[in-house]
Image (tube, helix red, strand yellow):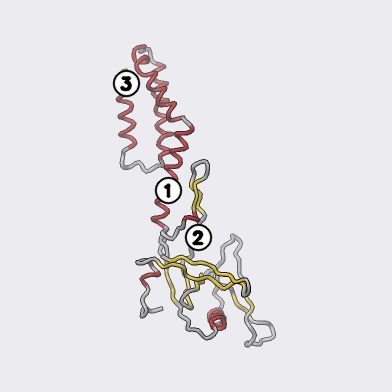
Amino acid sequence: MHIKPREVHNALVCWKKTPTCTMPLNSDISTALQLLEHIQHTINSSDDVKLQSQTTDDLNLLISVLENPIFRSIVTIQDSLTDLNQQLQDHPSILPVDFDIAPTGELVLNVPREPDLYYLHHGSQELDDQRVPQLSHSSSGDTNSPPQMHLVHSPDGTQPPITTSTYALEFQKAIEQSSHGRQILFIQLFKPENTSLGFSVVGLRSEDRGELGIFVQDIQIGGIAGRVAVHDPA
């Protein structure tokens, strides 16, 4: 048995560059470390003293580098940056405040689950079909009284769709009351999987009037929301 250090290095480099390998770099290095340790054990178990003398120092150096905590931290950061780049491609609406790199080098994402359907009205405010409040009138039957609003929560923490027969009418009446006579536009945006709707929102609050609602802050050109035209069907 005869293994040259350069052959071991070239084999590891070729294995790392294999197109079918899609694992994180940290996992690749862990696998390479196991291969080196296996080679080292095989050589040390052989009776070839010359081979041992030619490879011991190189193998020990390679193994010590791959085991180095600083090196592994750098690799973890590299994996996090690669993951972040993929997340930004899948979700272009991610903002700098939505992610961070932990002291360990790991990527920390703080992005809420994007709903599949939005209702945009008033030209600015957005409501999620699965998050809009369910409205109900008082037991007195007075249809002129303002509707009472309450949210429905499912056991797993998500909010299920509201499918009551009177929901659409009550929801429209609530929107009309909130609009104070201003024009209302209902727009449905259907979001494909792993695709952003292409706009960001911001919540406004006044010390005198309290919560003012949620308003569209930016619409990305070419995004789903940005492609909506004036005469498109609602």
Q: Nearer the viewer, residue 215 or 20?
A: 215
Relative to 78, residue 149 above or below: below
With 133 as the anchor, is 182 left or right in this view? left
Residue receiving disc 2 = 113
Earlier in the chain: of badge 3 and badge 1, it is 3
Residue receiving disc 1 = 83
- The picture places residue 158, in percent across and down from the top left corner, at 56, 63
Q: CA distance from mark 1 to mark 2?
A: 18 Å
Q: Nearer the viewer, mark 2 or mark 3?
A: 2
Please tell me how crowded label 3 is: few (under 14), some (14-19), or many (20+) other residues with Cα within 10 Å.
few
Where residue 224 is drawn, which disc sits there? Answer: none
Q: Write the residue at 61% across / 70% down.
A: 151
Q: What's under tag 2, amino acid-wise?
A: Arg
With 181 as the anchor, is 233 left or right in this view? left
**Residue 217 in sight from this viewpoint:** yes
Residue receiving disc 3 = 3
Q: Nearer the viewer, mark 1 or mark 2?
A: 1
- The picture places residue 125, in percent across and down from the top left corner, at 50, 73
Q: What's under tag 3, amino acid-wise?
A: Ile
Locate the C terminus by quadrant: bottom left
Relative to 188, residue 173 above or below: below
Please tell me how crowded label 2 is: few (under 14), some (14-19), or many (20+) other residues with Cα within 10 Å.
few
Question: Badges 1 and 2: C-beta atoms under 8 Å apart?
Answer: no
Q: Nearer the viewer, residue 210 or 200?
A: 210
State the image quarter where residue 145 is shown.
Answer: bottom right
Q: CA distance from mark 3 to mark 1?
A: 36 Å
Q: What's under tag 1, amino acid-wise?
A: Asp
**Residue 165 in sight from this viewpoint:** no
Give SS at disc 1: helix
With 229 as the anchor, is 102 left or right in this view? right
- The picture places residue 36, in percent across and down from the top left corner, at 40, 26
Q: Nearer the viewer, mark 3 or mark 1?
A: 1
